[in-house]
Image (cartoon, grey):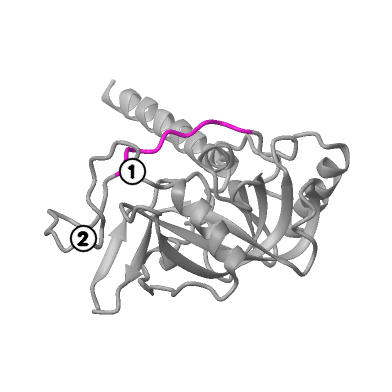
Amino acid sequence: MIAGRRTTGSFVLLIAAAIFVAAQKNTPPIPEPQPVETWKKSSVPVELAHSDPSTNEIREVRGSLFNDRTHSRRALDSPTPNDHTSHGTFPPYYVRIPAIPVAESDTVVEGTLGAFQPYFSSDHTGLYTELTIQVGETFKDTTRKAGKGRTITVVLAGGNLLMPDGKVISDSFVPSNFRLEKDYKYVIFLRYFPGGDFFQVIKTWELQQSRVIPTAHEDIVDATDGRSKHASLSSEDFVKAVSDAAATNRDQ
């Protein structure tokens, strides 16, 4: 009787092991860890006024977008002591958008983050950072500002500014549902804001030498669960899918 129970128990264990192995074979690969955007930890010296008046005017418009609407914050560079030099942020809330959102985008490019420069908001209560994107290829561009070989400006709230006296003033970056690491190559979906002549990012996909890597939360989840038809593509095939989608202006 005991021997029978042992045989039955061994059989059950063998079945469980077989199921486990099969499940392991069918489990989709988990995307590789994403770059941590190390540039966001860098402090950059404050930039003096530009010699071109029109550039200063545009920067003033951009800076006004990040002013304190509550009128409750002191200027970050105020001589009055502050409890801290960094503003807090709320936890991120991700809204699912299509994997290839060309219809929602004014501009879609293959690009690389080159330089970045933080600035004070117009009232000095916050910081924002201008990212310079070098355009390598253009798939869609209703703005006529993002042609191949040109540079475009992306604006993010937050930054780390190195003052002339050596003090670092920080304003926390607002959580985003994309990644842009310096000198990495991405397909970038963008929305244009003509008033300040800048772009904001809707979504990015990292282009590696042999594969494409999702950076948006929903795309990472889909890739992990095996529901993404794009995460397993080579970079070349993904770029073709983006180009085809842009030609019809339809999401995928």
Badge 2: few (under 14), some or many (20 or more) residues near its Cα, within 10 Å?
few
Residue closest to the eye, 6 or 15: 15
Specify the amino acid type for callout 2: Ser
Q: Position of residue 85 (x, y in %)?
A: 22, 58
Mark 1 Cα within 10 Å, few/some/many (few <14, many 20+)? some
Which amino acid type is marked by label 1?
Asp
C-alpha separation, residue under disc 2 versus residue under disc 1:
14 Å
Residue 9 locus on image (x, y percent): 35, 28
Left or right: residue 138 compared with residue 208: right
- Examine the structure image and report whether residue 113 is included in the region drawn in magenta: no
Residue of label 1: 68
Assign a secondary structure to mark 2. loop
Q: State left or right for residue 40 relative to residue 170.
A: right
Q: Which residue position is annotated with label 2?
A: 78
Residue interval drawn in magenta: 89-97
| Residue at horizontal 44 percent and vertical 75 percent from the top | 48
Provide residue 12's location: percent of width, then percent of height.
41, 28
* Quadrant where the image shows the N terminus: top left
Q: Residue at x 87, y 37 (%)?
A: 248
Corner quadrant of residue 90: top left
User: Earlier along the polypeptide chain: callout 2 or callout 1?
Assistant: 1
